Amino acid sequence: MKILATATMVTAAMMLATGCSSKKEEKKTPELSSVMEENITKDSVNKHITEWPEASKKATKFMMDKYGLPDGVTDETLVWTEVGPYARSVVYKEEIPHHFPREHTDVLEHTINYQAPTSDTVGQIWDFDGSVILDRTKGEMSARCDREEANILALNLAHEIVQGERSVEEARIEYGRQITAMLDGNPSYYTKTLVFSPADDKAGDPDHSIVDKLRKEGSGPMEAQEFDYE
């Protein structure tokens, strides 16, 4: 009996030690998301982006120096909400090669609230700069580049296209001219501030439902192609 009791005590002690060890191990390697959500600091952000490309690191340093710590952190992004004139700003780990107006990689995105333009104008924005994105449903316009100044410039020129103040070709030439001047140390206000006021957060267009109309008309999948959406 004494031997059995001793063995039982030893087993219990081992189980307790194992349990404590597991808990200690869990504390040593907590989930990254919980650490970053609860304790976003400059050091934790810098540690998080250790393996990120240099362009992403440079963009991160710029954003933290100017706007402070990000509001959200994921494996692939750092996110700032409502800083400066922007609804959202994002630094990406992923580099997207972009050759206009010079070779660089897109890693920094700035998004503003913006009323969607007409469909023909959307095509003009596409032709102007593939890294300017319009979201009709949410009511946003984004520009993605490697520097904030370039994004501000892209948003300004895209707005002028929407307003009919510049053609696509004029905007592309002006973009190249302004970027060249900026790189030569002579930036203009076009790269420093938006020349228009962003819309409010109700600029989105939720569209309208056609499902109930289709069901009412009894239209099948093929018939729906000729349905009058108006």
Image: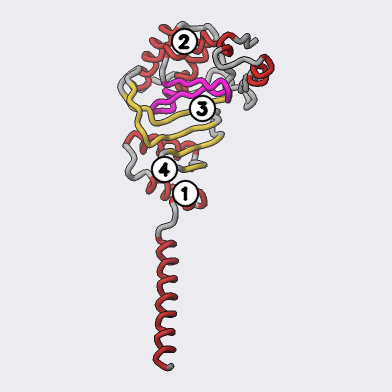
Sequence-earlier tag: 1 or 2: 1
Q: Which residue is pictured at 41% across the width and 18% down the height?
A: 130
Which residue is tagged 4? 75
Question: Is label 4 or label 3 in front?
Answer: 4
> Disc number at residue 105?
none
Mark 2 and mark 4 lie on one chain; the one further toward the N terminus is 4
Q: Could you tell me residue 54's position as x and y percent? A: 32, 36
Residue 220 on the magenta span:
no
* Sequence-wise first label, 1 or 3: 1
The local crowd at label 4, few if under 14, some if 14 to 19, many if 20 or more residues have their Cα within 10 Å, is few
Using the image, determine if residue 155 lies above or below residue 79. Answer: above
- Which is more toward the observer, 130 or 206? 206
What residue would you read off at disc 2? 124
Q: Which residue is mark 1?
A: 33
Residue 219: which quarter of the image?
A: top right
Residues packed near mark 1 inside 10 Å, few (<14), some (14 to 19) or many (20 plus): few
- Magenta-highlighted residues: 131-151
In front of the other: 212 or 18: 212
Q: Quadrant of residue 212?
A: top right
Q: Nearer the viewer, residue 35 or 63?
A: 35
The reply to whether the magenta stretch includes residue 144 is yes
Location of the C terminus by quadrant is top right
Any mark on residue 111, and which? 3
